[in-house]
Amino acid sequence: MTTSATDPATAPTPDAAEPAPAAARPGPSGLFQATAIIATIGVVVALIGLGLLFLPVQTPTQDCGTSIGFLLDGRVNELVSETAPPAGITPAEAKANNAQPCRSRVADRTKPAAVLFVAGMVAALGAATTEVAVRATRWFRRRPPHPKRSAAKAPAAPGSSGPPAQGTEPSGSEQSGS
């Protein structure tokens, strides 16, 4: 007599065919996914703001440099005479330079860049702080109890009065040898 593959006695069970991994961990919860996404977006926004601070600014007559460099170096505006502009500068360029010099152009670029940088950093640091706080709270809740603390909280065995409390003297009836 031959056995067939459809015989239920010899057919492999699904459990025996593919064992489950021993150390399978669940995926991150929704909160951890949200904090990771918020932190990533915050870092990207902060980098965009930082990039705007490093873009060069110029007027028709002056190279201001980067916004952050202009502010940190304490550079000054170079105003040009509109009636007798330097060689290679037209009166219209001189007027445009004087109407909006480097300092106002740098301020126009720095304000939104600084807002982006600060908002991105606040979002990233807030998300990181939330994640650390939640992970620490979960760790404290799931950690095993400390052996000394759990022994102190354990009830005494039935029939025994338990060890005497530290710092107390035994009563007169328990003392012997008087």
Image (cartoon, rainbow, N blue to C red):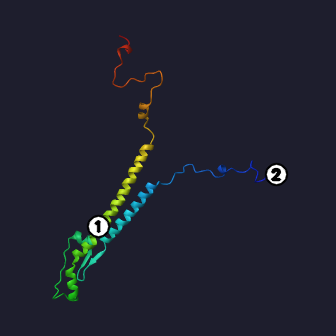
- Which quadrant of the rendered structure holds the C terminus? top left
Kind of residue indicated by mark 2: Thr
Q: Position of residue 113 (x, y in %)?
A: 30, 69
**Marks 1/2: CA–CA distance:** 81 Å
Closer to the camera, 70 or 90? 90
The part of the image, by quadrant, that contains residue 47 is bottom left
Q: Residues within 10 Å of mark 1 (few under 14, many from 20)?
A: some
In the picture, the disc for residue 2 is: 2
In the image: residue 155, left or right of residue 167: right
When the figure is inspected, residue 54 is found, relative to residue 95, above or below; the finding is above
Disc 1, SS: helix
Q: Residue at x 45, y 57 (%)?
A: 33
In the picture, the disc for residue 114 is: 1
In the image: residue 122, left or right of residue 37: left
Kind of residue indicated by mark 1: Ala
In the image: residue 90, left or right of residue 141: left
When the figure is inspected, residue 15 is found, relative to residue 53, above or below; the finding is above
Q: Position of residue 22 (x, y in %)?
A: 57, 48
Residue at the far right in the pictured view:
1
The part of the image, by quadrant, that contains residue 82 is bottom left
* N-term mark: 1 or 2: 2
Q: Position of residue 177 (x, y in %)?
A: 37, 11
